[in-house]
Image (cartoon, rainbow, N blue to C red):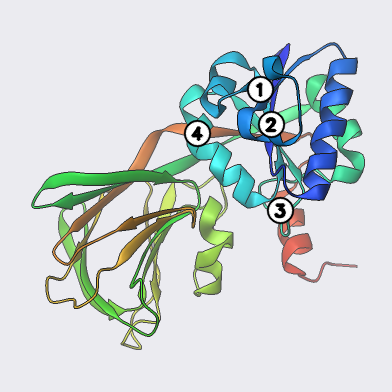
Amino acid sequence: MRFPVIGIIGKPHHQGAAETMLALREFLQARGHQVLTEEVCGKALSLPARERVPILSLGTQCQLVIVVGGDGSMLHAARALSNFDIPVLGINRGHLGFLTDISPLDFREKVTEVLEGQYTIEKRFLLAARVLRHEDPVASSEALNDIVLYPGEISKMIEFEVYVNDQFVYSQRSDGLIVTTPTGSTAYALSAGGAIMHPSLNAVALVPMFPHTLTARPIVLDGDSKIEIVVAASNRTNPQLSCDGQVHIKVQPGDSIVISKKPETLWLVHPEGHDYYHVLRNKLNWGSKL
């Protein structure tokens, strides 16, 4: 695959990310590639107007998009670019960096490998959520990591029922529920006691948050399941729905939240030799065999 036009998106107000984006732009242009930068980043970096485009235009005009930042930057890009079947590569300028796995110290070497065809593409699926009120849709969003129902107020529990493929699973009183993809299993769900799922799995997990019963445990479902969460009408607070921790939707008692797999996927690029288990050992400080 050739990449004559390459897009850049990232965290322009993060000094390290800004420096890397500018260096990356110069590096790519020196190799003869046309470079387009997401408009907010481009303005912050004082780039020429002809190089700045809306994020959706990156999906239509580029053959490759490089995200410079942390996993949050990749999550933002994924929701916008997953509709375009465009490869997305990450340079880590964040903390853990499960999704942005190239070090800024050797990005020239690794990006060169990708541009010369030495890469693999991993397809990661997203979740789509719709909020229904009296059976009418009132809001929707998508998530690469997770969709979380939470009280919206500290120290408040919420009651809800869960259905999978229209079959009743359980009713629960808790601090909320995390619906996670394999990609998100190393994020919020991990801290709530959920299992790590290999990204190749076609699965989603329901992870309760501080349930008011000792028998509530995470459950792993087929990735093509339709999940419905019905917020009990008796709730005294208005819960909220979080998509990747970046999009927040207010929910009312009695609302239903329908979650299913999005048909389009994120095309995540890795340089050759990418090892998921090495990433786990490195990011989670696991011991390794000597």
Q: Is residue 243 left or right of residue 121?
A: left
Give above or below for 30 relative to 198: above
Residue 43's label in the rendered image is 2
**Left or right: residue 281 compared with residue 246:** right
Specify which label sits upstream in the sequence, 4 or 1. 1
Q: Secondary structure under badge 3?
A: loop
Residue bearing mark 1 = 52
> Helix or strand or loop: what does disc 1 sit on?
strand
Closer to the chain start, of discs 4 and 2, is 2
* The disc label shown at residue 97, or none: 3
Give the image quarter of residue 39.
top right
* Amino acid at dot 2: Lys
Secondary structure category for the residue under label 2: helix
Q: Is residue 217 above or below residue 27?
A: below
The answer to whether residue 128 is seen in the rendering is no
Of pointers 1 and 3, the one earlier in the residue sequence: 1
In the rendered image, which quarter is residue 96 located in? Answer: bottom right
* Residue drawn at point x = 67 percent, y = 23 percent: 64
Q: Label 3 is placed on what type of residue? A: Gly
> Between marks 4 and 1, how big is the CA–CA gap?
16 Å
The residue depicted at 18 percent of the width and 44 percent of the height is 137
